[in-house]
């Protein structure tokens, strides 16, 4: 048998059958497993800049959540597009790969999914990193207000939500234009729009998240972008306190530290996961 000479730091794309949907993910590296979870309307590409910085120290698994990226997009009648549904799919992914306990890092909506998983499946999560996580009730943006309109909302979201609006949503996130165009192409098909709409309606209610915070037992690092106005830094401090004194780190960037300051972000994550320090 020819030995496997693949470079473990070279990302490999794979699929796995999870609860209700096929998940596509990329993995690289070896060592303790680390799962990275993307934001709403994003995909695994949001982590491209930090993956090569983390893979030398960890086995990094970066999935597209069901309904997003290149993962399967089942109709809402077949999949629960909410925090619980996503977290259950990730638990299936962890089990399918035989990972045991994992460290979990989630950005924004992905942070809410990570928080839900840590609160519900404590035996799966070793350490937790939350990046500008969605926890407290957000101020609805124009897109959310539009989509919530009875009858008209679904039509506007599924039919008229175009590239310009999509790009404007990512303008503050430091995402490269080619990356946003790629995300829009993945979003601009009926099944993806339907999944995104169902997700948007579900994540508007953050009360289950707030209630789950006291159940999180895993050591946690909360990170925040100082310049992200919709979620002021004080929300991060509040979350760190409510998590029983979690570590808290602020980056001089906007909504997405992994994309805007990947080197500093990766260094903070490595320090916390390996030494229990946030910087």
Image (tube, helix red, strand yellow):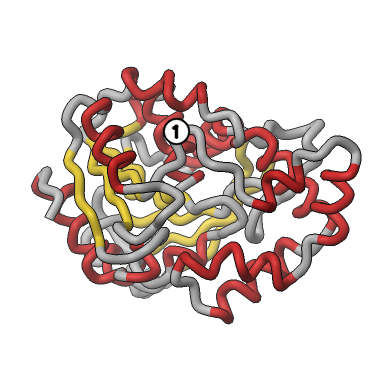
Neighbours of disc 1 within 10 Å: few (<14), some (14-19), many (20+): some
Q: Where is residue 33 in the image (x, y as percent from the top left)?
A: 32, 48
Q: Position of residue 76 (x, y in %)?
A: 78, 36
In the figure, 233 relative to 253: above or below?
Answer: above
Q: Which residue occupies the extreme bottom position in the image? A: 178
Residue 1 in view here: no
| Observer-nearest of 158 and 104 | 158
Q: In which quarter of the image is residue 250?
A: bottom left
In the figure, 56 relative to 75: above or below?
Answer: below
Residue 168 in view here: yes
Q: Quadrant of the C terminus?
A: bottom left
Q: Position of residue 72 (x, y in %)?
A: 71, 50
Q: Quadrant of the N terminus?
A: bottom left
Total numbered labels placed on residues in the image: 1
| Observer-nearest of 192 and 108 | 108
Q: Position of residue 219 (x, y in %)?
A: 21, 33
Q: Is residue 158 found left or right of 185 in the rendered image?
A: right
Q: In which quarter of the image is residue 57?
A: bottom left
| Observer-nearest of 255 and 11 | 255
- Residue in the picture at 28% in, 41% down: 234
- Residue in the picture at 49% in, 53% down: 38
Q: Is residue 82 found left or right of 151 in the rendered image?
A: left
Q: Is residue 57 found left or right of 14 in the rendered image?
A: left
Report helix, strand or loop for mark 1: loop
- Residue in the picture at 53% in, 64% down: 13
Residue occupied by mark 1 = 136
In the figure, 63 relative to 114: above or below?
Answer: below
Q: In which quarter of the image is residue 9?
A: bottom left
């Amino acid at each position: 048998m020819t030995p496997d000479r693949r470079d473990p730091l070279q990302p490999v794309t794979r699929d796995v059958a999870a609860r209700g949907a096929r998940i596509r993910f990329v993995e690289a590296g070896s060592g303790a497993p680390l799962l990275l979870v993307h934001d709403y309307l994003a995909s695994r590409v949001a982590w491209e800049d930090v993956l090569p910085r983390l893979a030398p120290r960890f086995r990094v698994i970066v999935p597209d959540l069901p309904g997003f990226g290149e993962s399967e997009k089942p109709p809402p009648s077949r999949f629960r597009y909410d925090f619980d549904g996503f977290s259950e799919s990730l638990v299936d992914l962890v089990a399918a790969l035989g990972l045991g306990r994992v460290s979990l890092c989630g950005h924004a909506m992905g942070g809410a999914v990570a928080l839900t998983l840590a609160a519900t499946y404590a035996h799966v999560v070793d350490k937790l990193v939350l990046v500008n996580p969605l926890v407290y009730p957000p101020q609805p943006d124009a897109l959310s207000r539009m989509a919530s309109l009875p009858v008209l909302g679904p039509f506007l979201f599924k039919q008229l939500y175009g590239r310009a609006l999509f790009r404007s949503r990512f303008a503050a996130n430091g995402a490269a234009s080619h990356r946003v165009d790629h995300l829009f192409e993945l979003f601009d098909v009926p099944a993806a729009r339907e999944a995104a709409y169902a997700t948007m309606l579900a994540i508007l209610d953050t009360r289950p998240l707030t209630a789950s915070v006291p159940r999180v037992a895993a050591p946690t690092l909360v990170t925040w972008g100082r310049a992200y106005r919709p979620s002021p830094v004080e929300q991060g401090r509040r979350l760190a306190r409510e998590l029983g004194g979690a570590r808290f780190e602020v980056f001089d960037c906007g909504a997405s530290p992994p994309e805007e300051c990947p080197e500093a972000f990766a260094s903070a994550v490595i320090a916390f996961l390996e030494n229990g320090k946030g910087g």
